[in-house]
Structure formats: structure tokens, C-alpha cells
Amino acid sequence: MNTIKHYIYDYLVSIGLSDASAKYLNVFILLIGLVVIIFLIDFLIRKLLIQAFVQFAKSTKTHFDDFLIANKVPRNIAHIIPFLIALEFIPDIFEDFYDLEIIVEKGLIVFSLVLILWMVRSILNTVEDYLKTLPRFKDKPIDSYIQVFMIFAWLGAFLSAIAIITGIPFIKFLTGLGAISAVVLLIFKDTILGFVASIQVAINDMVRIGDWITFEKYGADGNVEEINLATVKVQNFDKTITTIPTYALISDSFKNWRGMTNSEGRRIKRALFIKQDGVKYLSEDAVENLKGIQLISEYLNSRQKDIKAYNASKNIDKSLLLNGRNLTNLGVFRKYIDSYLNNHSAINKDMIIMARQLAPTTQGIPLEIYAFSSDKRWENYEYIMSDIFDHLIAALPYFELEIFELPSHSSLKHLA
């Protein structure tokens, strides 16, 4: 390097440049040359190292090396040799500019801290991905431990970088920092909380711009418009704006609807409250009448045949409907709901479809419909759900069932 350096300098002087101009131009040319060489070496080493890791991964049965490649461990390791080359030749290039040499060397040392953190993070991510494939670690919060470790690692690197740049010994720097930390924490409490929260929100991917979130504590129900250090701005569906402290996203509970948006359907979960005194066994004539409903006619034929065969085999006395096996109007109505939903064009057939009976209440028997609409857009979802319940409410009298409702003024007046 010294030979090349002097050769370029002598040449520049020989063509008429002043001593100072020749030194500056010489440093500039050497620096550009070193950068080009470092990039070439980095590119070649990176390609060779990645290719070697890929070949090695193909020859092994474990997935750990595959995760090493996926998390860019070889790529980060490849930066070490170019960095050492730069650190070796910088003193020679800036030999005539000591102050500039110190600045560049400090910059390289700070970069080395970042490089170490990159390598540590990629290795830890590899360990995390690998452990998650093992049954005994699947339900363990490994990512939380790694996040805590990385926060302290970044903090340590940040403090070290400041100590390197200022030239203050690290121990003395920490001592001085501790003396003013109480005042700093008091003055910048909200900013620090917001900063830590924004890091956790970003790392955990809790909220993205455009997500629909519901945060009852702050009256927020709408789309996230902006996320910054201190606040999250939500535009509600009534076009009002709600501002939420960023740290509230990690200290309080809120609902993010992104999972629903990314899924194949939007859940319909609503119950009809059936009057209990309307539930009864179905007589032969009642079953025959219900066979006129096309969606359940085949079901009724099959069930009636099975029930008759069972009762006959057990010599059941059917002079009383209670004896033996029977169909009920509520059970047949549940089957009708199930058939209706499975034939509805707006219901996603690949997701769960269910009509279930919940525990009786003072308002009647809740008959809950649980299904998913294919269309997730709010207005269309509401239309689909209303259409389904319009139909079911209108269908109830055919099964001699009624919806429970509290007496109104007009009904009380009629009784009077």
C-alpha cells in the first residue's frame, strides 16, 4: 500500500500539483480504490460462503443450517474479512492526516459494533426458528427472551458507540450517565415509554398502518392512519380521529382485526331466543307437513325411517309421544338452519358452519348461528347477516316456534 501511495503522490507532484493538493488527491484516490476492493472482496466472499452453506445444508438432515441461511448468518459473517482489510489499511491511507484517520477509525469501530449486533441477531433468530420446530419449545415465549436480550444489546452498543466517539472511557461514561439518568427519566418519561413501546410494536408486528383496530378504553374503532414515537392516530368509522398513546398498545388490551381481514371469511355469531313453551315433539302429521320444506325433506324421511325402526325393535308404546325416540320442532329447525347456511351462496363452506343451542335463559333458549361470510366488507357483511336472520325469523312459524320478546305497550294495552 505504501508503494502505491508514494507512486501516486510522486506522479501527482510530477504533473505540477502542489504538495498539499497532491496529498489530498492521493488520499481520495486511495480511499476510492480501497472501497472498490472491499466491495469486490465482500461480494466474492459472500457468494462463496453462501454457496458453501447451501451445499452443506443440502448434505445434512438437520434444519438448523437451513435456518442459518434463511436468517442471513453467512452474509453477515462474510462482512468480517472486508472490515478487517479496511481497518488494516486506513492508517496507511490517512498517514498524513492524523485527525481524519482517528475519525475514520472510530467510524469503523462503531460499524463493527453494528456488525456484531447483526450477527448476534441473525444467530439468535436462527436458534429461535429451530427451537420452534421442537415440540417441547413450541409453546415457550422464546421470541420475548430474544427481544429483551437484543434491547439490552442495542443499548450497550449505543452507549459504547458514544463512549468511542467522545473518547471517554466506557466506565467513566457510565458513571456520568448514571448521575443524570434520574433527571432524564423524569423529563422524558413519556418519550422513553413511547420509544420502547414503538420498538415492541414494530418487533411484534402488533399494529400496522391501515389495520382496523378496536380500543374500547380510548373509544377507538377504525383504521390506523399514523404510528409515531408518542401516539397512534386512528380514524374511526364515523370519521372522527382518536389519538392513542403508543405505550397503551403494550400496556392495555385492544383488538386488531387484521386476522379477520387476512382470513377467508368474516364471522357471523348471533342467536335467536326461542320461547321455551313452544318446544315440543312432532307427531306423524306434523312431520309429514314439514316434508314440504325441500331443504329438510330428505333428512326427515331418513330420520323418520331410522326412528320407526328403532322404536319397533324396542317395542316402544307410541300411544304416548314421550316414549321412545322422537323428532322435536326445535331440533328439526336447527337442521333446517344448517341446511340453509350450507346452501347459502354468501357463506364460506370451507369454514365452520354451525347452529347450536346454548343454555336456556330467562329470555328463552338461545339458538346461535355460527358461520363465516365469504365477503368481508362491512356493508356487505351486514347485508348478508341481516338477510340470513330475516329468513330464519320468518321461517320460525312453520316449525310452530316463536321468538321471545318482552311485552310492549300495545300488547299490554290489548290485554287490558
Image (cartoon, rainbow, N blue to C red):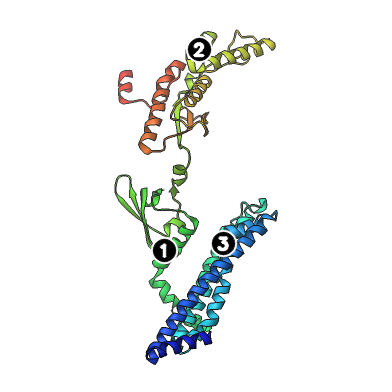
Q: Residue at x 31, y 52 (%)?
A: 241
- Tell me whether circle 1 and circle 2 mark residues in contact (CB < 8 Å): no
Q: CA distance from mark 3 to mark 2?
A: 66 Å
Which amino acid type is shown beneath numbered disc 2?
A: Lys
Question: Nearer the N terminus, badge 3 or badge 2?
Answer: 3
How many C-alpha atoms fall within 10 Å of the one at disc 3: few (<14), some, or many (≥20)?
some
Which of the two discs, 3 and 2, sits closer to the camera? 3
Asked whether the viewer can see residue 395, the reply is yes
- The residue shown at (33%, 26%) is 408
**Image position of 324 with respect to 194: above or below:** above
Could you say where residue 179 lies in the image, as x and y percent from the top left? 46, 81
Residue 40 on image: x %, y %: 52, 70
Residue 63 quadrant: bottom right
Q: Write down the residue under mark 2.
A: 291
Q: Which residue is mark 3?
A: 72
From the image, tell me which residue sits under label 1: 194
Which numbered disc flags the more N-terminal residue, 1 or 2? 1
In this picture, residue 295 sits left or right of residue 224: right
Q: Is residue 280 left or right of residue 193?
A: right
Using the image, determine if residue 308 lies above or below residue 107: above
**Left or right: 56, with 219 as reference point:** right
